[in-house]
Image (cartoon, helix red, strand yellow):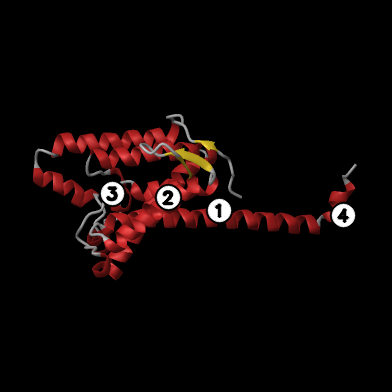
Amino acid sequence: MPQTQSGTLSFPPFYGKVRALILINALVYFAVLLFFRTQDSLYKEVYWIYGLMPKLVFAHWHLWQLITYSFLHANVGHILFNMLALWMFGSTLEQYFGGRRFLEFYFFCVVGAALVTVLLTFTMGDFLRMSPETPTIGASGGIYGVLLGFGYLFPNREIFMFPWPFAIKAKYLVTILILIALASSLGGSNGVANIAHLGGALFGYLQREYNAWKIRRAKKRFQVYLRKHGSDRDTFVN
């Protein structure tokens, strides 16, 4: 069951797997900026090779792109928003899950968002204005999965969204962000990036449902065990 904690979300500790992810993303961003920005052809090639290009993933099996695209960002604003969201919401999830489970969840959403992007590019590309030769970059797929996980586990946690001087509950914030991404995917020209957002949220939801199913199955097995061994259990009751 989700926790119904209330209170304002303050700055969480900067540590663990979240810190490692943020530092790696920042290092990759500045390395690309310093070593390739001055050479336009090489700069574009980095995004073609390591960004998520559906044509290369589908036709040439460049499967590493399903992960590497999440470490590339277009500009300072892009990486700043993603890393701030990862820190603010991911740190709380890492405290809840533990480092290993958090990384599994994060990259499950990253890869899931990439697979959704590739699938929809080849099935609904014309409708969504998505080209198989357009690379997708950014950690937004993983970030939206993290947002959905946070909204599920801490739905009543209140968050201040700068510069607005009021708080909003996590469950409402996540709903608004997902609706914005959906509307942008259907009505904008930047459908690929927004589909990645939705794909990350979708796989975050699937992971949540899978974990809930495992818990229900474990409880059911335990109940069956108790019924089968009820007499033995009663023997040891004082």
The secondary structure type at the circle numbered 3 is helix
Give the Cα distance between marks 3 and 4: 57 Å
Give the Cα distance between marks 1 and 4: 32 Å
The residue lying toward the viewer, choosing from 165 and 116, is 165
First in sequence, mark 1 or 4: give its number: 1
First in sequence, mark 2 or 3: give its number: 3
Which quadrant, please, contains the C terminus?
top right
Q: Residues within 10 Å of mark 2 (few under 14, many from 20)?
A: many
Judging by the rendered image, the residue that carries numbered circle 2 is 145
Amino acid type at circle 1 is Asn
Q: Are marks 2 and 1 in contact (CB under 8 Å)?
A: no
The x, y position of residue 237, in whole percent, is 88, 44
Judging by the rendered image, the residue that carries numbered circle 4 is 231
Residue at the (48%, 57%) spot, across then down: 206
Give the Cα distance between marks 2 and 1: 14 Å
The x, y position of residue 222, in whole percent, is 72, 54
Number of dots carrying numbers:
4
Amino acid type at circle 4 is Ser
The x, y position of residue 16, in whole percent, is 44, 32
Q: Is residue 232 above or below residue 9?
A: below
Judging by the rendered image, the residue that carries numbered circle 1 is 211
- Residue 69: numbered disc: 3
Q: Residues within 10 Å of mark 1 (few under 14, many from 20)?
A: few
Q: Quadrant of residue 156?
A: top right
Residue at the (30%, 63%) spot, across then down: 186
Give the Cα distance between marks 1 and 3: 27 Å
Camera-near label (1 vs 4) is: 1
Amino acid type at circle 3 is Tyr
Amino acid type at circle 2 is Gly
First in sequence, mark 2 or 1: give its number: 2
